Amino acid sequence: MQFGVSIPHYGGPLAVDALRETVQRAESLGYHSAWVGDHVITPQHFLTGIGPNFYDAFVVLSHVAAFTSRLRLGTSVIVLPYRSPLVVAKMVATLDALSGGRVILGVGAGNAPDEFKALGVPEAARGARTNEYLRAIIALWTQEPASFAGRFVEFSGVHFQPRPTQTPHPPIWIGGHSDGALRRAVRFGEAWHSGGMAPERMAQTVARLRQFAEAAGRHDGPSVTTRLTVQFVDGAQGGEPRRPGRGAADQIRQDLLEYRDLGVSHVVCGFGGRLGPDFNAAMERFAAEVAPAVA
């Protein structure tokens, strides 16, 4: 099992020095990857929790790439329908080329109606649009010249450089829990990327994923990955049910062993809503007290 760090690039101002310190420390601690999310505008339902700031995913990852030499650079996840697939393909290929082949492209179909409206993108066909955009992006990365004809995008004889460093292209992780998302993971994904499911629900969803993979003749199936909010709480925790990832170190270790038993190969860990000493201390404690027992 490998572990990544979810970078909180939203809420308040993002200090470049704090970002550099965190990702370089994560690299020295042996973390596999650094991850960012994606919103062009901050959806209304996020305003109370995080506020209006949300820094661009690809710009943040370009800084992470410049500050590090080994950490993989992941999106958890890009809302693919928001941007032209030619633009996404260009940004990812450029980042992969300049980082020495470190990008993992996590994508999802999105679920924020006000953001779709603000961007002028119809929400109703977001699943079909996501599938088609993935096909178009792969064509741009693997054909020279590239051509594609679909319902939402069409191009012919396109010369597209630079190509990604990774061949045939960066790994694609598919987010989402619907049957459409699971089928998309089987069709396009090196991995299915869960958004923090409890183990009991994940077991049911993984079984469904395996069914779709078998039906499609993909007998190995995509890998299973997840996000997890980690919060160390020592001593009494009150009467509320404990969520996975919250508790003493031994409890968090047990949570991760349950995920590992379900076949989870990679966990993207969030350690708080702001970069700074508390975030880094939690990241360091996890690397010392939790990761060695389950990795």
Image (spheres, grey):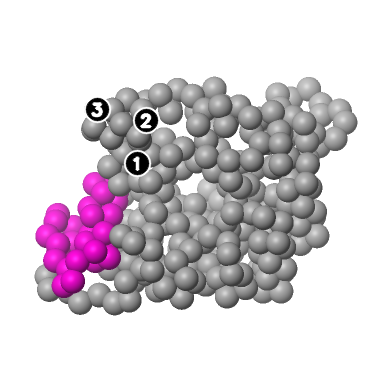
Evaluate if marks 1 and 2 touch, with contact meaning CB atoms under 8 Å apart: yes
* Measured Cα–Cα span from mark 3 to mark 2: 10 Å
The span shown in magenta is 126-154
Residue 242 vs 183, above or below: the answer is: above
Specify which label sits upstream in the sequence, 3 or 2: 2
Residue 108 in picture, x, y percent from top left: 39, 49
Where is the N terminus found, in terms of image quarters?
top right
Badge 3 density bin: few <14, some 14–19, many ≥20, Cα 10 Å: few
Identified at 49% across, 71% down, the residue is: 99
Identified at 57% across, 75% down, the residue is: 66
Residue 147 in picture, x, y percent from top left: 14, 66
Please, what secondary structure does the residue beneath circle 3 have?
Answer: helix
Specify which label sits upstream in the sequence, 1 or 2: 1
Residue matched to label 3: 215
Residue 229 vs 161, above or below: the answer is: above
* Measured Cα–Cα span from mark 1 to mark 2: 8 Å
Q: Which mark is residue 209?
A: 2
Badge 1 density bin: few <14, some 14–19, many ≥20, Cα 10 Å: many
Specify which label sits upstream in the sequence, 3 or 1: 1
Please state which amino acid type lies under the numbered disc 3: Ala
Identified at 35% across, 35% down, the residue is: 221
Evaluate if marks 3 and 1 touch, with contact meaning CB atoms under 8 Å apart: no
Q: Please identify, in this view, whether the residue under mark 3 or under mark 1 is nearer the observer.
A: 3
Q: Quadrant of residue 35?
A: bottom right
Where is the C terminus found, in terms of image quarters?
top right
Badge 2 density bin: few <14, some 14–19, many ≥20, Cα 10 Å: many
Residue matched to label 1: 185
